Image (spheres, rainbow, N blue to C red):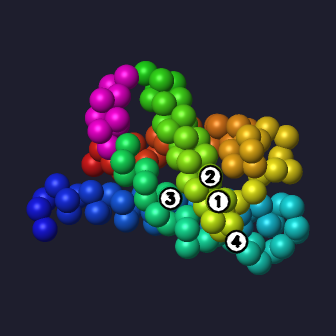
Amino acid sequence: MKRGLKKQVSDFMKCGLMGWGMECFWTGCGSLYEKKDKQMHCATSLWMFPIYGLASMMTPLCHLLKGKNLMLRGSVYTACIFLTEYGTGTLLKKKNCCPWDYSGAKANYKGLVRFDYAPLWFAVGLLYEKILLK
């Protein structure tokens, strides 16, 4: 396997696994807070691994934004994450297998994106940047 392809596969795996881990942490904390579940059960889907893995496609963007203002970088990554969430959610919804539905949230768009998650995605984007620029 060529070095470039090996790095792409490695980055995809890192982003996918990191995303899964963050989702387990987030939903586990949510179950403690919302349901008073002391076991902190978490929820995710196998679909989420490749969706989080897609963050590896931001590598060229990370290189382009390297050294730029933190707010600019985080905002661009947030927009990329929202677009990915909307795009993958739309495709999965058509097949009746979208693992999330934000319809009940106030700041949602078509049940696929929650704009109140922007600060979270801002931080996640910067975390992915750290991984992708190694």
CA–CA distance in space, label 1 to label 2:
6 Å
Determine which quarter of the picture holds residue 92: bottom right
Amino acid type shown at disc 2: Thr
Q: Is residue 67 magenta?
A: yes
Rendering coords of residue 37 (x, y %): 84, 73
Q: Which residue is mark 2?
A: 90
Q: Which residue is mark 4?
A: 42
Give the percent coordinates (x, y) of residue 10: 29, 63
Real-space CA distance between mark 2 and mark 4, rounded to the nearest whole angstrom: 24 Å
Secondary structure under tag 3 reads helix
Kindly indicate whether the residue at mark 2 contacts the one at mark 1 (C-beta within 8 angstroms).
Answer: yes
Q: Which residue is mark 3?
A: 51
Distance (Cα) linking label 4 and label 1: 25 Å
Q: In 3D space, how far apart are the residues under numbered discs 3 and 4 (Cα atoms)?
A: 18 Å
Q: Is residue 130 visible?
A: no
Left or right of 106? Residue 7 is: left
Q: In front: 10, or 105?
A: 105
Q: Specify whether 113 is left or right of 55.
A: right
Q: In this picture, which residue range is highlighted in magenta?
A: 59-68
Q: Mainly helix, strand or loop, the magenta region?
A: helix
Task: Please determine whether, in this image, residue 87 is positioned above or below residue 48.
Answer: above
To which quarter of the image does residue 78 belong? Answer: top right
Q: Secondary structure at mark 4?
A: loop
In this rendered view, identify the residue nearer to me: 26 or 43.
43
Q: Residue at x 32, y 57 (%)?
A: 11
